[in-house]
Amino acid sequence: MTASRWQPVIGLELHVQLNTRSKLFCSDEVAFGGEPNTRVSEISLGYPGTLPVLNKEAVRKAVLLGLACGSNINTRFYFERKNYTYPDLPKGYQLTQSRAPVCEGGSIPVRAGDNYSKAVHLIRIQIEEDAGKSLHDVHDKYSALDFNRAGTALLEVVTRPEIYSPEEAGAVLAELRRIVRYLNISDGNMEEGSLRCDANISLRPANSSELGRRVEIKNLNSIRFLQQALTYEIGRQMELLNRGEEVAQETRLFNPASGKTFAMRTKEDLNDYRYFPEPDLPEVVLESSFIHELKSALPELPAARYQRYVSEWHLPAADAAVLVEEKEMADLLDEVVHLGHHPRTAANWIVGPVRSGLNNTGLLTADRLSSIITLVEEGKVSFSVAAQQLLPFIIRHPGYTASQAAQQLGIIQTASEDVILPLVQAVLRDYPDKVKAYKNGKKGLAGFFMGEIQKRSAQKTDPVRTREVLERLLR
């Protein structure tokens, strides 16, 4: 059987670490890094007799994500114990949700190329606590355990098995990262473990509705690794099926160095975890006013913003994709346009010099960027000088207005013919052959002359007035 006879079917379990100040069921501080086992307490270490207290902020952030994804918000839900034994799980169980999650249903839009052409549906969004971390490279003969992460608040977002390629899976993960950042419920930094992914994949004969035997790939912490792991796993399973062999139902890990997955353990079934309701936590009841308040506070999400930029403002799809990647950039664009600038002009500034200039420098307000754009549109400063000199100066010196900064830098353009005329005459005098060629029909040389004039004036001559003088002298 050829590759085209098989269809991969993928479902994702996406783990979002919430940016709450404390853990899900206790007051331990949550922060990346730090000395091992310094952000722990009797509760997060599971000492006998300790009792959990639910973090309300984690519930708020869970409901926000559910509303953003169009999920049904369950006004009554509870927590369950998921029982399994693993060294980095100090209590011997994880507090999570199975039968009564906070959110059910919903979807994540998927952008393929220039359009959001599909939505991947969700089964549920549940609140759960994270485990600790096993460190296998600290000591030669044994593993070390760091429980700083144990008890941190997570959201597990479970998709339906309706993803059909590694690229589509990567697009789902990328969109969720954008959404949680827009909502400010997580920083989404995959390199720090704030967003992780497990992928369930099986192959079935094309045109069949029956799913194949499922393999789970655990702990994928980048979009690239997710796509590489799925690509390898599709090939591995395809080879087995083509030889008439069965695919083992198992949990596998991905080795980025080799680009291959390898078996970790036989895949557990749900009943292996012996779920039962957490006896030390009451049922949670959400008031309708709480949900309504959060719904009214939802920002415009990246997919809607992207569509608006492309459809209404007619921005290039590539620019729109860059702009919606970070909410701060998209907010800046909207504010600058609101101040009266054309969307394409504002977008060119933000995608270009602003985006590169803000990498290591700080934040730029809309009114200050607007004032720079206005100086360029009025012909008082050239675009290149404004981008290369004025913008960095404004960012470093917030006390200056754009006009004051331009004066300080000495970059104000002049339209005075007393200044422009001698410059034009000097350039034409220095290039008599090109003047002759221009008059014989090579009109494109006008750009060469303009470039020379601007270079000699350090771009301080008004280009419109300069071109008028140049054309007059070339007649």
Image (cartoon, rainbow, N blue to C red):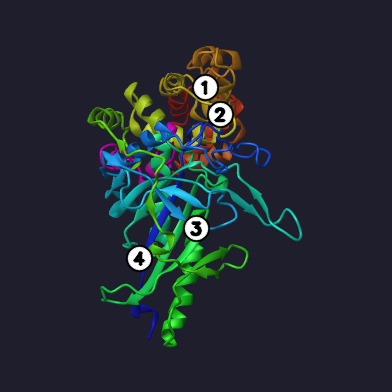
Q: Nearer the viewer, mark 1 or mark 4?
A: 4
Res 200 seen here: yes
Q: Are marks 2 and 1 in contact (CB under 8 Å)?
A: yes
Q: CA distance from mark 2 to mark 4?
A: 58 Å
Q: Are marks 4 and 3 in contact (CB under 8 Å)?
A: no
Res 319 seen here: no
Q: Quadrant of residue 332?
A: top left
Q: Looking at this view, is 357 or 437 the one in front?
A: 357
Q: How many marks?
A: 4
Question: Where residue 31 sits: x, y (%)?
Answer: 57, 36
Q: Looking at this view, is 372 or 418 the one in front?
A: 372
Q: CA distance from mark 4 to mark 3?
A: 31 Å
**Can you identify the residue that label 1 sits on?**
461
| Category of crowding for the residue at label 4, using alpha-carbon neighbours closer than 10 angstroms: few (below 14), some (14–19), many (at least 20) | some
Q: Looking at this view, is 15 or 181 the one in front?
A: 15
Q: Nearer the viewer, mark 3 or mark 1?
A: 3
**Can you identify the residue that label 4 sits on?**
164
- Which amino acid type corresponds to the residue marked 3 in the rendered image? Tyr
| Category of crowding for the residue at label 3, using alpha-carbon neighbours closer than 10 angstroms: few (below 14), some (14–19), many (at least 20) | some
Q: CA distance from mark 1 to mark 4?
A: 58 Å
* Helix, strand or loop under label 1: loop
- Which amino acid type corresponds to the residue marked 2 in the rendered image? Ile
Does residue 350 sit above or below 92 in this rendering?
A: above
- Which amino acid type corresponds to the residue marked 1 in the rendered image? Thr
**Can you identify the residue that label 3 sits on?**
84
Q: Identify the main secondary structure in magenta.
A: helix
**Residue at the spot x=48%, y=64% of the render?**
217
Q: CA distance from mark 3 to mark 1?
A: 74 Å
Q: Quadrant of residue 64?
A: top left
**Can you identify the residue that label 2 sits on?**
453
Specify whether 65 is left or right of 215.
left
